Image (cartoon, helix red, strand yellow):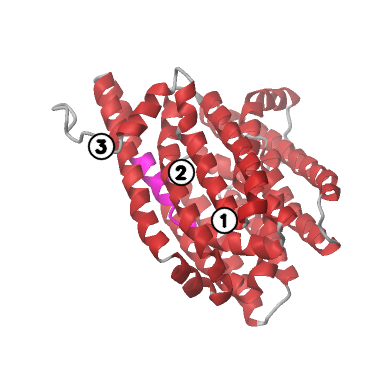
């Protein structure tokens, strides 16, 4: 799965760069805006069921068909509900008919996300190779189609259609892998009681998913409404470069956190020390990326995307520093799970999202897309760092993060 993720990030980045160079900032802005608009509501279609279904399949494998069938039809209903929400929201935007068409084409792909329930089965059985293989097939088809459409100089519509083909190819790949294991069909299984229990457990995760989607995509929506599609293209291109390395903090945190949790059984002092060292690693890793990118931002944008995107260099030089708080947030996300404080994590995310919207509203008219980059940096900092100061259960994390600038490596003899 790690190999698939790394391949997806690097292949996806370079294919996107190739597509962006072909489309130009304005057309790429329309494409990015349509994707962002759908993503803003896509978490509703998931209904927060992913982790819950995996957990239930692990605990009660004999109820596999009931869990998968119920989750499938719930996610199908969630996708249809999301399309209705899109239809309600679109009239309040200033989009032309073509952009609205693109939004609904991309949105139709949410229906095929219902087949993700087969992914949950493979996760519950620790059969990651099947999921990874399915996603590699999806990535290969998507990349080849996009490169082909650039080669034949196709219209933007075809790149939009690829977004739906992505979902269809993944659904078919998962279905084929599930069929190869001769597990039968779950489509005829639906239990109302199970559905109620799933939704009762998932509603906080739905709220969290909406908050995260709002947090990650509202900037592109506001840029389109306040500045235009060309600016969306410039900003999106810069952000894709800035975020290209974000998989690294996740790998580091996932790999090291078991040792940190084990330290808690030894002593609270050792636990805090190792957390501080993890924070320090994230901090200096992010700074190590941000400094050279800032110094070469204009050249990076011009080299990757062409001279027409060089204007996004300032955005890149500001946005890349948000990686500090991304790394700290990923590390602290593991701590929230360990301490069972997911609700506080969701609250911090909501605060960050609200801050992002407010700052964008005031900064975009003055500083344009550069203001959006600064708003992202500030809101990430508030959500992942400053907000910790204002709750008694997280205040210690704030001080540990602050002291991570000088983590006192090896200060305690027991921290070996």
Q: Which residue is mark 1?
A: 370
Of callouts 3 and 2, which one flags the residue occurring earlier in the amino acid sequence? 2
User: Where 233 sits versus 414, above or below?
Assistant: below
Of callouts 3 and 1, which one flags the residue occurring earlier in the amino acid sequence? 1
Residue 168 position, x and y percent, is: 68, 57
Give whichever of 26, 152 is nearer the camera.
26
Of callouts 1 and 2, which one flags the residue occurring earlier in the amino acid sequence? 2
Query: What residue sits 82% from the left and 50% below the top?
Result: 90
Mark 1 vs mark 2, CA separation in Å: 19 Å
Q: Which residues are magenta?
A: 242-255
Q: Nearer the viewer, mark 3 or mark 2?
A: 3
Mark 3 vs mark 1, CA separation in Å: 31 Å
Q: Nearer the viewer, mark 1 or mark 2?
A: 1
Q: Which residue is mark 2?
A: 326
Mark 3 vs mark 2, CA separation in Å: 19 Å
Q: Which residue is mark 3?
A: 406
Would residue 178 be counted in the magenta stretch?
no
Query: What residue sits 66% from the left and 27% below the top?
Result: 203
**Residue 370 shown left or right of residue 362 in the figure:** left
Residue 215 position, x and y percent, is: 60, 42
Residue 324 position, x and y percent, is: 41, 45
């Amino acid at each position: 799965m790690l190999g698939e993720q790394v391949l997806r990030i690097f292949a996806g980045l370079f294919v996107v760069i190739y597509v962006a160079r072909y489309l130009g900032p304005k057309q790429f802005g329309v494409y990015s805006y349509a994707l962002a608009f759908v993503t803003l509501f896509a978490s509703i279609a998931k209904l927060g069921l992913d982790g819950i279904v995996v957990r239930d399949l692990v605990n009660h494998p004999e109820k596999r068909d009931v869990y998968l069938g119920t989750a499938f039809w719930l996610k199908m209903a969630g996708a249809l509900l999301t399309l209705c929400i899109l239809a309600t929201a679109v009239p309040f935007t200033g989009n032309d008919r073509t952009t609205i068409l693109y939004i609904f084409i991309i949105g139709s792909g949410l229906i095929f996300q219902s087949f993700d329930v087969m992914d949950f089965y493979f996760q519950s059985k620790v059969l990651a190779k099947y999921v990874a293989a399915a996603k590699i097939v999806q990535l290969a088809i998507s990349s080849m189609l996009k490169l082909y459409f650039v080669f034949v100089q196709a219209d933007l519509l075809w790149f939009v259609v690829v977004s739906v083909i992505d979902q269809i190819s993944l659904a078919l790949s998962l279905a084929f892998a599930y069929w190869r294991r001769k597990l039968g069909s779950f489509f005829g299984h639906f239990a109302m009681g199970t559905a109620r229990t799933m939704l009762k457990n998932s509603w906080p995760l739905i709220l969290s998913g909406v908050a995260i989607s709002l947090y990650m995509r509202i900037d592109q929506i506001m840029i389109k409404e306040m500045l235009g599609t060309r600016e969306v293209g410039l900003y999106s291109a810069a952000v894709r470069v800035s975020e290209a390395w974000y998989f690294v903090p996740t790998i580091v945190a996932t790999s090291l956190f078991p040792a940190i949790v084990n330290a808690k059984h030894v002593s609270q002092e050792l636990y805090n020390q190792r957390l501080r060292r993890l924070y320090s690693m994230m901090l200096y890793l992010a700074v190590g990326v941000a400094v050279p990118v800032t110094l070469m931002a204009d050249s990076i944008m011009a080299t990757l995307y062409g001279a027409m995107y060089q204007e996004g260099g300032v955005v890149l030089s500001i946005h890349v520093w948000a990686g500090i708080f991304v790394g700290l947030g990923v590390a602290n996300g593991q701590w929230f799970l360990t301490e069972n404080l997911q609700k506080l994590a969701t609250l911090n995310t909501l605060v960050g999202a609200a801050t992002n919207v407010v700052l964008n509203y005031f900064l975009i008219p003055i500083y344009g897309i550069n203001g959006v980059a600064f708003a992202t940096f500030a809101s990430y900092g508030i959500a992942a760092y400053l907000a910790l100061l204002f709750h008694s259960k997280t205040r210690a994390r704030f001080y540990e993060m602050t002291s991570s600038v000088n983590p006192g490596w090896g200060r305690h003899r027991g921290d070996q």
